[in-house]
């Protein structure tokens, strides 16, 4: 599967504000592109996992960005109910993993 960061042609205008407060001016000499490229790969991987878990990217998605030093950042943006469903999936996964480890957190 290719890049899946968006959820169709109009994914930027679907109501999820992913711009955030870090959309200020860029500092000359800072390599934002390298950081963003790494973040984009990670965001695409997470978006494929979200789709695989039955979530819609128009409701919740990973978004690539950078911080002021040019380091890649991946943010999760979503409607509260979709993020709540994602949290429920992660809670169930954590419970499964704990059960597989014998309920002792993996301690020997």
Image (cartoon, grey):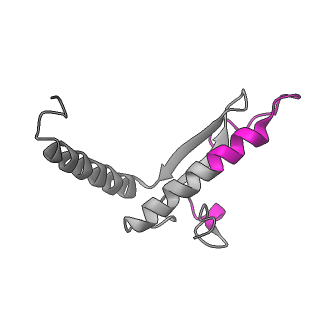
Could you say where residue 78 lies in the image, as x and y percent from the top left?
A: 47, 54
Q: Which residues are magenta?
A: 11-40
> Is 64 contained in the magenta span?
no
- Which sits in the foreground, 62 or 11? 62
The quadrant in which residue 50 appears is bottom left
Is 45 situated above or below 31? below
Is 4 situated above or below 100? below
Task: Give the residue displayed 32% in from the left and 57% down from the top.
Answer: 85
Name the quarter where the C terminus is drawn: top left
Could you say where residue 18 lies in the image, as x and y percent from the top left?
A: 60, 49
Could you say where residue 106 lies in the image, as x and y percent from the top left?
A: 19, 34
* Magenta-drawn stretch, dominant element (helix, strand or loop): loop
Is 9 situated above or below 72? below
**Residue 56 visible here:** yes
Name the quarter where the N terminus is drawn: bottom right
Task: Give the residue displayed 37% in from the left and 64% down from the top.
Answer: 53
Is residue 86 shown left or right of residue 73? left
Total marks drawn?
0
């Amino acid at each position: 599967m290719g890049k899946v960061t968006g959820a169709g042609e109009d994914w930027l205008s679907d109501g999820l504000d992913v711009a955030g407060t870090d959309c200020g001016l860029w500092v000359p000499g800072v390599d934002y592109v390298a950081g963003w490229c790494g973040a984009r790969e990670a965001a695409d991987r997470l978006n494929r996992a979200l789709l695989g878990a039955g979530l819609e990217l128009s409701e919740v998605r990973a978004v690539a960005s950078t911080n002021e030093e040019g380091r890649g950042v991946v943010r999760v943006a979503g409607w509260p109910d979709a993020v709540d469903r994602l949290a429920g999936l992660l809670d169930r996964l954590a419970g499964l993993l704990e059960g597989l480890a014998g309920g002792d957190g993996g301690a020997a």
